[in-house]
Amino acid sequence: MDLRWTWNHSGDELWRRLDPAQWARTHHPSVVLQTVSRERLASALANPDFCGLLDSLVQAKRQASTAPRWFQQEHPQASLGCVAYFCMEYMLSEALPIYSGGLGNVAGDQLKAASNLGVPVIGVGLLYQHGYFRQVIDRNGAQQALYPYNDPRQMPVTPVRQANGEWLRLEMLLPGYSVWLRAWQVQVGRTKLYLLDSNDAANVPIHRGITGELYGGDRELRLKQEMVLGIGGWQLLTALGLKPDVCHLNEGHAAFALLERTRAFMAEAGQPFPVALAATRPGNLFTTHTAVAAGFDLFPPSLMEQYLGRYAQEKLGLGLREFLALGRKNPDDGNEPFNMAYLAMRGSGAINGVSRLHGRLSRHIFAPLFPRWPEDEVPVGHVTNGVHMPTWDSAAADDLWTEACGKGRWLGTSATLEADLRRVSDEKLWALRTVSRKSLVEYARERIGQQMGAAGAEREVIARTQGRLDPGILTLGFARRFATYKRPNLLLHDPERLIRILKNPQRPAQLILAGKAHPADQAGQALIQNWTSFIRRADVSPPVIFLADYDMLLAEHLVQGVDVWINTPRRPWEACGTSGMKVLVNGGLNLSEIDGWWAEAYMPDVGWALGDGQEHGEDPAWDASEAEALYERLEQEVIPEFYTRNDRGIPAAWVKRIRESMARLTPKFAASRAVREYTEQHYLPAAAAYHERTANKGAVGKQVVEWQQATDRKWDSLHIGDLRVETNADHHAFAVEIFLNDLEPSSVRVELFANRTDGSDPLREEMKCADAKIGASGGRVYHATVSAARPVSDYTVRTMPQRLGAAVPLEASRILWQR
C-alpha cells in the first residue's frame, strides 16, 4: 500500500515470484496479493529464499522511513512544519488511475521527490470513481472512450480513520443539499496524499458523481469538483489537526482553498476578510501551467452566485460584487466570468510558471491585472519542472547510474553526477541502448497483438504488424495528448516522404506512437484516425504502430526504450512538457521544438531542435516549413549519425551525444532539483513570512491592509514635479520633485527607469530622498546618479508603493510615471 515500490524496484522480484503474469500485467502489488491463491502464497512463505527477500525489504523500508534526508541535513533549524500541495490529479502509478497527463505527472513526481528529500509535503486531491477515460481503437481506427470503475478495494488507498476508528467524513453545503465527502489516504514513501470522494451512500445520486470523472462533465460539475478540492480539501486538513505553513496550488483548480484558509483564520483571529487574506497570503504559492488565457477555468457569475454566494456572505463577510471581484479583471463588469487563476493570483504571495519561457509567457497573460507596469515586472517567476528519475529509469539504466554515481544519487544535491557520468564507457552506454530498445520492441509487439486481437484482427494481420518492429533499428517515439496545438501529424505532412525515410534499406527507422484525444475534442480524434489510416496502408506496410490507451505503464516502456523522442508543439503553447525529460535518464535523445523545457535544455551536442525560437501562431505555411525541417533533420542528421559505426560496431558520435545528454541534462531536469528550488526559493521564505504576518492574531496583516488602503486613498493626488539633470563626462545626475500628498516617504519608492537594450535587463536605480520638504504640498527632492553611457532621454522617473515585507506589485499595483 506504500507507493514507494513505484520507484524502489528492489521488491519487484517478490511480486514476480508470487504471480509473474499478474505482475507483468498490472505492476500492482495489492492486486497480486488479492488474486494469488492461498496455496501459492503458503508455498512462497515456506521458501527460505523468499522469506529472506521479504525480511530484507522490510528492514530496508524501516531504515528509509527514519534516516535523515536532504531537508533535515541542510535545513535542520527550518520553521517549515508542513506544505499542503493541492492538485486536481496525481500520476503516481497505473495502480491509482486518477490522472490525465502532464499536470498529474508533475504532481506525482514532486510528491515522490519530496519523500526522497525529506521535505514535509502533504498532497490533497480527489479520488475519482472513473478517473480519466480509457482508450480503445476500434476496427475503423477511431478512438472510443471507456470509463471503467475504480474500485477502491483494488487500489492502494485506505480510509482515513478518526481516533475512535470511524471513517473520517466531511459535510459540505451545496445549494439545497449537504454533500458528504469520504477521506482516503495514499502512502507515498514518507509523504501522504489525502483524497476526497463524494461517492457516499448518504448523498443524492447527482452529488455521488461529483468525483466521477476527471475533466468530464460541464461547467457546473467542474465548479463543484473544485469546491470539493479547495474548500473540502482545506477542511480535511483541519479535521486531521494539520495546520500547514504553506499552501501550494498546482494550477488554479484548487484556488478555493485560499478562501477556506482565509475563513479559518478569520474565525481563529477574529479578523475581517481583508486582514485575514493579507495575513495568510504570504504562505500561499500558485504554480500556473496554462499557456493560453483561454485555458483558465472560467465560471459564469450566475453559477458562482448560486454555489458560493451564501458562502461568501456568511463565511467570508463579502457581498457578491466584492466576492466576484476576486476573480475578475474589471470588478464593475457584471458579465465578466470568474477566473480561477485570478483568484489564485490575488490570494498568493508568489506565482511561478513551469519553465523559463512559460514564466515570460505568463507575465504576458497576467499583464492586464497590472496596468502600466512593464511586462517584465509582472510578478510571475518560474521553477522549471523536473521528473522523478527513479520512477522513469529502466532496470538497466538504474544499474548503470548506480555503478557510476551510487544508489543515493537523487536523494540530495547532484553536484558530482555530471563528472561521474562522463566516466562511463562507450560500450556500456551503447549496451544500455541496445537492451532497452530490444525490451521496448518485445513489449510493443505483445501490446499491439492484444490491441489488434481485441479489435477483431486476424492472426496473420497481427503477426505482420508485429513483424514491422525490429530491435536492431533506430526507434523513434511520439506519445502525448493528441491536440491540434501539439501538431502530432507534422510527421504526416508528406506521407510518401515519411515512408521513404522509414523504409530506407540501408538506414531504416521505425516509429511507435501513443496518445489520447479528449472525448470532446473531435479535431484531436481526427488526428489519431489519420495516423491509423496511414498505418493500415497495405501497399507499403509502414514500420509504424499506434499503441492504444496511453497510460503510465506504457509511458514507462516508451521513455525507457526509444532512441529519439519527438515533440512538435506550436511555440509557445508547450508550457513545459515533461515526457522528453524522462528519456534523459535512459540514454534517449530529444528532437523537439524549441519550446517549454527544451528551450532551456537544447544545445547542439545533446539533441536536435526544430524552429527558430520565435512564435508563428497557427500559420499553415510555417507548419509546412517545420515539417520540411523535421524530415531534413531525420534524413541528414539523426539517422546517418545512428548508423555511422566505428570498428567496434558503436556509433561513436551518437554515444557521445548520449553521454552529454545524460550527464548535463538529467540532473538539471530531475524533480529532486525542482523540489529543492521550491523549498529554498518558496517554501522556506513563505513559511517565515506567513508566521510573521499571522502572529498576534494577524497584527502585521492588519498593518499591511491599512498601508494598502492609505496608498489607494492618496495615490491619485500624488504627482511628479520638475526634473533636473546635470551631465559630466561620466555620469548623469538626476534630481526630481515628488509631491507625496501626506504619504510617508517610507511608503513609496522612487526609481530612475530605462528600458532594456540589446538583451540586457532594464535599469532600475532607486532615487534617494532629501530630508527637506519643499512647498506647501510636502514635496521632496529625490536624487540619483547613473552612468552617462546611455542618453538622458532613455530615463524616466517612476513612483510605486513600498513597504517592508510586502510584495509589490502583487499586493499594491499602483504606479506613477513621469509625464
Image (cartoon, rainbow, N blue to C red):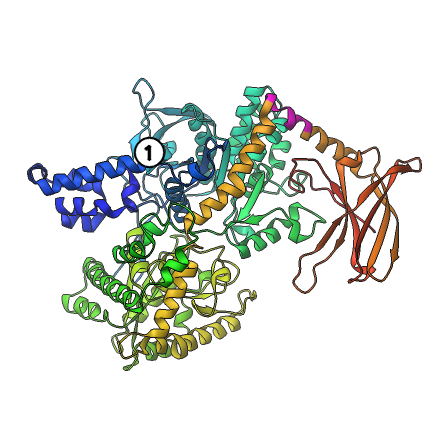
Q: Residue at x 33, y 48 (%)?
A: 133
Residue annotated with mark 1: 66
Residue 510's place in the image compared with 293, above or below, is: below
Q: Which residues are magenta?
A: 696-703
Between 655 and 597, the one nearer to me in the picture: 655
Residue 55 in sight in this render: yes
Residue 471 sits in quarter: bottom left
Residue 412 as seen in the image, left or right of residue 533:
right
Secondary element under disc 1, as helix, strand or loop, is helix
Residue 352 % position (x, y): 54, 47
Residue lying farthest to the top in this orientation: 164
Residue 52 % position (x, y): 14, 40
Residue 647 % position (x, y): 27, 79
Q: Residue at x 41, y 43 (%)?
A: 217
Residue type, label 1: Thr
Residue 118 as seen in the image, left or right of residue 678:
left
Residue 608's place in the image compared with 796, above or below, is: below
Predominant secondary structure, magenta span: helix
Residue 106's place in the image compared with 716, above or below, is: below
Residue 69 sits in quarter: top left
Residue 87 as seen in the image, left or right of residue 155:
right
Q: Is residue 702 magenta?
A: yes
Q: Is residue 33 magenta?
A: no
Residue 510 % position (x, y): 29, 71
